Amino acid sequence: MARLLLHGFALAVVLAAAGTARAEQDPTEETIAAANEAGVDALDLQGAVNTTQLQPRVYLIAVGELAPPAPPAPFGWPFGGPLAQRIYCIEALESTHGLHMWNPAGWPPPYFNEHAQGWLGWLPSTARRWGVQIGNRASEWDGAARMLLAGAGNQFYGVAAGRC
């Protein structure tokens, strides 16, 4: 009997705390904005924020009501994600990440009239076709992303060789 009373008392304390947390204060502007974004009740969210001491968006991300923000692009990349990892691999093979951006003249055919240039080793004709400004890393990456998504990525050595 004493055990049942102890469990009942503990449950009553938890329920009282939960009820108090929900009604402790009116939702803040930040809580209302986050609740509207997630489609949840602002008063319930404020109670969860009061109970957990987390910021509203942090709480909603933790419980899966909001998607986490996209991570920033690493290493100064123009953008992030799996496609960027593939382009970064191409960049490593084509220019050693900008250390060798201009190939010398005298390359064998069919490249003797054009020389690979820039961060991703663009031939000038290919760059013109895809609207890329050679030497502008963001432009080169944008063009490479469009090429890869269009299925034309085999024009890059790393893709054609199966290395990227």
Image: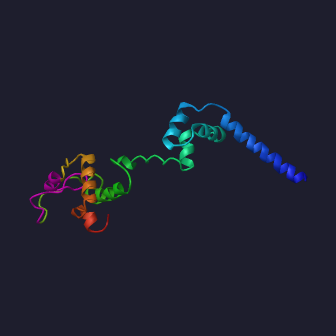
Q: Position of residue 65 (x, y in %)?
A: 53, 48
Most extreme residue toward the bottom, as rendered? 161
- Residue 79 or residue 118, whichever sits in front: 79
- Residue 115 or residue 70, whichever sits in front: 70
Screen quadrant of the C terminus: bottom left
Residue 147 located within the stretch drawn in magenta:
no
Q: Which residues are magenta?
A: 109-129
Please report the residue visible at 27 percent of the width from the left and 47 percent of the height from the top: 137
Please report the residue visible at 20 percent of the width from the left and 49 percent of the height from the top: 132
Residue 112 located within the stretch drawn in magenta:
yes
Horizontal side of 50 relative to 60 (left or right) equals right
- Residue 153 or residue 77, whichever sits in front: 153
Q: Position of residue 22 (x, y in %)?
A: 66, 37
Colour setup of the view: rainbow
Please report the residue visible at 28 percent of the width from the left and 60 percent of the height from the top: 93
Task: Choose top left, top right, bottom left or bottom right for residue 46.
Answer: top right
Q: Position of residue 152 (x, y in %)?
A: 23, 61
Horizontal side of 25 relative to 16 (left or right) equals left
